[in-house]
Amino acid sequence: MQAELIRKYNVPGPRYTSYPTVPYWDKAPFTEAQWKEHVKKAFQVSNQKDGISLYLHLPYCESLCTFCACNKRITKNHGVELPYIETLLQEWKLYLQLFEGEKPRIQEIHLGGGTPTFFSPEHLKQLIRSILETSEVTDTAEFSFEGHPKNTTKEHLEALHEVGFTRVSFGIQDFDLKVQEIINRVQSFESVKEVTDNARAAGYTSVNYDLIYGLPFQTKESIVDTIEKVKLLKPDRIAYYSYAHVPWIGQTGQRRFTEADLPADEEKRLLYELGKKMLEEAGYIEIGMDHFALKEDSLYKATESKSLHRNFMGYAANYTQLMIGLGVSSISDSWTAFAQNHKKVEDYQQAVAEGHIPIYRGHPLTEEDLILRKHILDVMCHFETSWEKEEQQVGILFEAKERLTEMEKDGLLEIGETSLRVTDAGKAFVRNICMALDGRMLRAKPESRIFSQTV
């Protein structure tokens, strides 16, 4: 039965870090002036209540990981560090001007990339201290960064902990040497153990590992070996992602191998089910799409209190209405609108140098967008959602019940008069359920392939 469901529902689909998803944002021009108004309103509503979130995109890497679909710049020239940080801080000053003298209260900072630990500990500390000097920090704030096990030093960990970081995420992917070589990410178990031990010794209270299933040359045996090694190190959280093979959107590194090298369909899903079973036996709880946490971790506690939130940074323990993305290609979210920065470093730096918030596109959310966004978020964060009877006047929501009937017959969810709940069997197909609520994608009827497979 599981194999039949995988064949039936394994179709291209979004990962839903936002709704609407980026390919279906409005094509109409979205100006800097429009974005500023959305930011001002969101800040006025949320700063004293929930605080704001910051995402800082640090795009540089010394080498190319061939599985990666992120926006990155490959270089060994560390002379790019300081000019880039200076631009980030100048962009932050442009946002501070919108707050009219009121200090932002920061609930969350996340450093992503690229490889944040490409930057020196001194430069990273300078960056964060400069931001904190202009801000306040909430009592429940969480600061986190993504670290490469091969270049995250004790000095990196200590410097960032000194300025408030308590969470770190290490990209492990797989411990099998053959897999590591084809994805150009060779790192030993010993090096991962060392950096994990260093993080805990420095005072980090939450360590996350990113693992990926569906990589080239992965087998049942390599997944078992990887999870067994992960269990020895006992990270607090685990993101167990499906590999997104999208070479057609310009990810040239992914052309190092072909789809023939990848575990496909049922074989790929069995790798996930095997890993999930092993993680659950080790005490990890599935808390959202692809994510697992120990009961002591704040993400698990957020599922218990129904405060779990999802944004462009992934799952978060707390909601903030305003998330500001700084850096090249970063996406910001005011809840009522999205805005994305220029994708090329040179364009980004030039826009900031000219005194502009460096957005090149955006999307103001319609009333329907906001309603559907709420329900898609509820499904992704809580595996259930409910609506008021008057909301059924939203055509897509009304029609969704009919589209979801087939999934209900397959045992993936339960539909009530004004609610739906994802079953345990349906958790593997959450993206498919969200697609039934995705009004913009359903109306667009995409003919070209723009997403990776859902399973």
Image (cartoon, grey):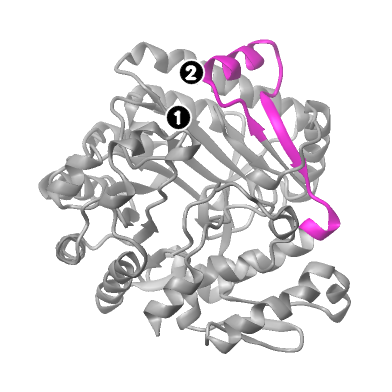
**Where is residue 257 shown, x and y percent of the image?**
28, 41
Magenta region: 340-369
Residue at x 89%, y 76% (from the top left corner)? 390
Q: Position of residue 172 (x, y in %)?
A: 26, 49
- Is residue 345 located in the magenta-colored stretch of the structure? yes
Query: Which of the two labelled residues, at mark 2 and mark 1, occupies the earlier sequence position?
Result: 1
Q: Work out whether residue 280 or residue 399 is closer to the camera in this orientation and state it.
A: 399
Left or right: where 34 falls relative to 433: right
**Which residue was labeled with disc 1?**
58
Q: Is residue 371 magenta?
A: no
Q: Quadrant of residue 148?
A: top left
Q: Residues within 10 Å of mark 1 (few under 14, many from 20)?
A: many
What's the residue type where badge 1 is placed?
Leu
Q: Is residue 431 visible?
A: yes
Instruction: Label 1, secondary structure: give it.
Output: strand
The amino acid at mark 2 is: Tyr
Label 2's element?
helix
Check residue 84 in the rendering and tell me which mark sits there, or answer none: 2
Asked which quadrant contains residue 155, the reply is top left
| Residue at image coords 19%, 61% | 219
Looking at the image, residue 433 lies above or below residue 448: below
Decide which of 369, 45 is in the foreground and name it.
369
